Amino acid sequence: MLFLKSTAVTKAPGIYELDIAAKPPGKTFGIFMATDPAHPPTEVLTALAKLGFQNTYQQSYTHKDKGKVLDMHFQKNGTDLFNGWKTEECAANMAAVEELFKGIGLTIAPRVMTLAEAYA
């Protein structure tokens, strides 16, 4: 679950928060979004599916400011060991993800999770 300060402001239509992160060693990234369930980012969700990302987790909750939130996680399998991404796949997938979110005005900042964060 992403840390949200408030549901009063969205980063893009229907998106409260966005995180692009990978478990160490950091070649296979997942997309983590906190969305507005009343106004979902339908075009983004459709584009992610077209890029091969699958919704692997979603949970609704009410934020402390009483706003409704749908937490969603997406991943895409690769051809490396344990369905990870090879270096070429990582470059291609991240370029596509960057282009997708750039199209709605978001700049992504991919990161590698800490071990504690990745395996909590």
Image (spheres, grey):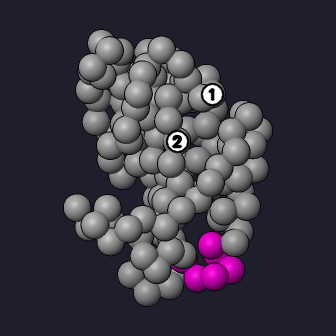
User: Over which residues does the magenta segment extend?
Assistant: 85-90
Residue matched to label 2: 18
> What type is the residue that disc 2 sits on?
Leu
Instruction: Answer whether residue 34 is visible to the viewer in this image.
Output: yes
In the displayed structure, 18 sits above or below 10; it is below
> What's the residue at 50%, 85% (across, down)?
80
Looking at this view, name the residue that lies furthest to the bottom: 81
Residue 1 placement (x, y as % from top left): 32, 43
Residue 96 placement (x, y as % from top left): 71, 57
Front in this rendered view, residue 1 or 115: 115
The answer to the question of whether label 2 and label 1 lie on touching residues, with beta carbons closer than 8 A, is: yes
- Mark 2 to mark 1 CA distance (whole Å): 10 Å
> What type is the residue that disc 1 sits on?
Ala
In the displayed structure, 80 sits above or below 71; it is below
Report if residue 51 lies within the magenta region. no
Residue 18 placement (x, y as % from top left): 52, 42
**Secondary structure found at label 1:** loop
Is residue 66 shown left or right of residue 113? left
Residue matched to label 1: 12
